[in-house]
Image (tube, helix red, strand yellow):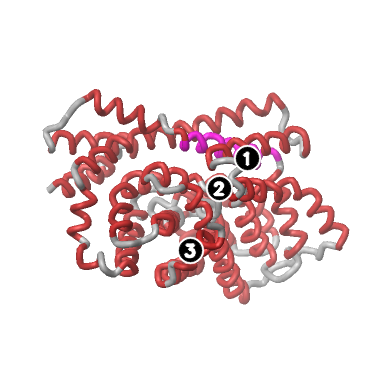
Amino acid sequence: MTLTIFLGSLFGFMLLGMPIAFALMLTGVALMVHLDFFDAQLVAQNMLSGADNYPLMAVPFFILAGELMNAGGISQRIINLAVSLVGHIKGGLGYVTIGASVMLASLSGSAIADTAALATLLIPMMRDHGYPVPRSAGLIASGGIIAPIIPPSMPFIIFGVTTNTSISALFMAGIVPGLLMGIGLVCAWTFVVRDMTVKLQPKASGRERLKALGDGVWALALPVIIIGGLRGGIFTPTEAAVVAAVYSLFVALFVYRQVTLPQLVPLLVQAARTTSTVMFLCAAALVSSYMVTLADLPQQMTELLAPLMSHPKMLMLAIAVLLLAVGTVMDLTPTILVLGPVLTPLAIKAGIDPAYFGVMFVLVGTLGLIHPPVCTVLNVVCGVARISLESATKGIWPFLLTYIVLLGLLIAVPEIVTMPLHLFH
């Protein structure tokens, strides 16, 4: 009965068109009323606790770093470097998209920010060189969702805070799946591009490639600093976000000089707006998360899935199917906030490594960003490319299918994800 009230209230409020944050908060209130436990002060206290969390300080700094990277020319130089290396081969701009996606993913951790930067710079180039725009849009959107998997990742931070999972472990466990996503896109694009007739980029000379590498070295240094600092124990994930923001500010202001002091104000405002949305979601989610724990919903889910508890891979498959279904109607952050506290204890009880589960949870959730109807990332590309969502959906299917195959591989062989944890332990 409690599980029915939880799901019924949540999806009922969402169907009424209520913002996710308010739907989460009122779902917690509905559980309070059902348990005869309503207390307005408790709602306020949980919302304050939801936002007053030290690890969540990483969110505004990573968001700010992403804004600075796009405005400060870091994203542009990453793309220029990729163009100089592989732009001249058939389908080269597609490989540029994939390479730039992986490199940008290791800088900002935001799918929307990376996708917007890639689409703005690459869609006009790909259109001019004869690439089908729907297919190009599908590839860029598919590359954009690598950002939540390769560290630093904001969804990993939110998942870690929500479920009390080590954020550093999540970061390390995300490296191999993120790289495999890039390799999978390369394979899919190689298959897709065979029948295309496109104009090739002129081959860059050795001097031009060295110049592109020199221009991009400041951008390439950031992931090395972040990952090295985390593994070396120099700073925590939260402090890494500050390092990323300060480094991006320094490069944008004093190295590339594409941002001036007056231009910082709108960047700070935009970062603040995005941060406020995420933080309010986290605050509201703690109300429902608190009541989920109090109502012992994880135990009810355990009883519901009891036949699968002794088969971790089958349980992971069932959860993946559930998350794919939820991803059709809910964005990634709300999915983490709503289902993370419910499903993580269940996975741990079945013997699934929490870092592995967190990576798989986020990976499945990111697929909802590129398949309708929610498809936030795909909508961003559609807006930039000025094409319909229907056209972009037709263009994305080979890459979405590739990700589903990869998902099956990672469920069948979980050691692929946990390997870095053992190597760097």
Q: Residue furthest right?
A: 207
The residue type indicated by label 2 comes to Pro
The residue type indicated by label 1 comes to Ala
Which callout, 3 or 2, points at the residue further toward the start of the chain? 2
Identified at 64% across, 37% down, the residue is 68
**First to last magenta residue range:** 55-72
Q: CA distance from mark 3 to mark 1?
A: 25 Å
Q: CA distance from mark 3 to mark 2?
A: 16 Å
Q: Nearer the viewer, residue 6 or 357?
A: 357
Decide: marks 3, 2 in contact (CB < 8 A)?
A: no
Q: Which mark is residue 417?
A: 3
Decide: marks 1, 2 in contact (CB < 8 A)?
A: yes
Q: Secondary structure at mark 3?
A: helix
Q: CA distance from mark 1 to mark 2?
A: 9 Å
Q: Secondary structure at mark 2?
A: loop
Identified at 79% across, 54% down, the residue is 213
Residue 183 spot, x, y in % from top left: 58, 67
Q: Nearer the viewer, residue 327 or 315?
A: 315
**316 left or right, relative to 142:** left
Identified at 21% across, 33% down, the residue is 29
- In the rendered image, which residue does mark 2 sit on? 152
Q: Main secondary structure of the magenta part?
A: helix
